[in-house]
Amino acid sequence: MDTAIYDVNNLTDEMSERAEVYGEEEARRAVAAALCAVEEAARVIRRGGLVAFPTETVYGLGADAFNEAAVRKIYAAKGRPSDNPMIVHVARASDIGALAAALTPDAVRLIESFWPGPLTLVLRKRAEVPLAVTGGLDTVAVRMPDDPVALALIRRAETPLAAPSANISGRPSPTTAAHVLQDLAGRVDAILAGRPCRIGIESTVLDLSEGAPVILRPGFVTADHIAALLGKPVGTDSALRARDGSADAAAAPKAPGMKYRHYAPKAEMMVLEGRRDRVKSEMERLKILNERLGRRVGTLLFEETAFLEAAHRLFAELRALDDAGVDLIIAGALGTDDGLGFAVMNRMMKAAGYHVIRV
Ligand code: TXA
Ligand code: MG
């Protein structure tokens, strides 16, 4: 399949402001050209095709959420298990009415505070939402992304977009257009190539379908943020606390996608956990030891409390280490008391297949 690649780098809030508020001719032309590209991509969606697009979290691979045949193509393009439901992306909060059966007061408050943004809400679905989107579940996950390209695409397609992350299933999520090309060129109809994603890890998935709010996947919006807004405790899916990734019934995650091997680089990966000075020296020792055995070793150590930076760079670093052809990645753990640290470590542990060494 030929994949059309459209440059939408210039479709940013800043460029739009320069074009509209300050009337800068150059900015106006650049924004208009990008919007033309988005219009082409929207046409692809309306015809039942697949389009990869940037969001503030990671790139998504979208199809018309109400077109079952189009949605099925996503599973094929990604090599994704078909029981793994997708997030449906809307451009206006009111569009959730076409997807969710009922909005709880909690849902309304969360939408008012966090949309557009990296918070996905799981609600009872309307009958019209195809089961192909929800992996057969009677709930639907919905979010409104905070990205001008994503919003323009959804608006122009005139339909919500079912969109998982735009990677081959199991690989680190794509945070740049180059990552998307690497995985999906030749497998999808079009790629909107924009800027690197601002946040870098996927949205928080919050289940509201059974009353009490429960986090199914940690992300940029933390349990503390949500609890502070709702004035009530927020649960965390117990499977997220299981340190061994075990898939026994008690620890089976409620978000089906959380049970798969995920975010995984091709290299073997281990995470060192403990006091910083020990992590550093053990990392050096293991590196030298493994290099003596003829293995190529890459290391990954973020500043201990640089959670934003770690979220922003984690997936890109894993891909870069793969591209460099290392056999072993040795990473240092971050603290998990901070909600964003917890979200980053959730990805890092999965990438490492829960291979943790206490030092
Ligand atoms: O930031 C994001 O959320 C990105 C961008 C593209 O929006 N999307 C994303 O989609 O990460 P995906 O498909 O890679 O992950 C969706 C997660 C999976 O863990 C899936 O199991 C869960 O959300 N999920 C989706 N619908 C669900 C539902 N009805 N009930 C429970 N979990 C659901
Ligand atoms: Mg994904």
Image (tube, grey):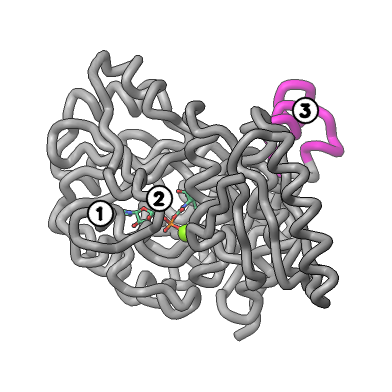
Which x, y percent locates residue 233? 25, 22
Residue 100, picture quadrant: top left
Q: CA distance from mark 2 to mark 1?
A: 10 Å
Q: CA distance from mark 3 to mark 2?
A: 49 Å
Q: Is residue 172 left or right of residue 337?
A: right
What crowding class fits label 3: few (fewer than 14 Cα within 10 Å), some (14-19), or many (20 or more)? some
**Dividing the image into 4 quarters, which one contains the C terminus?**
top right
**Which SS class for mark 2?**
loop
Which residue corresponds to the image point at 74% horizontal and 51% vertical from the top-left?
283
Which residue corresponds to the image point at 72% horizontal and 44% vertical from the top-left?
301
Which x, y percent locates residue 177? 70, 59
- Does the magenta-highlighted stretch encompass residue 206? no
Say which of 303 and 5 sits in front. 303
Q: CA distance from mark 1 to mark 3?
A: 51 Å
Q: Which mark is residue 251?
A: 1
What's drawn in magenta, residue-wise? Answer: 11-28
Please identify, in this view, whether the residue under mark 2 or under mark 1 is nearer the observer: 2
Which residue corresponds to the image point at 25% horizontal and 41% vertical from the top-left?
207
Q: Which mark is residue 243?
A: 2
Residue 215, picture quadrant: top left
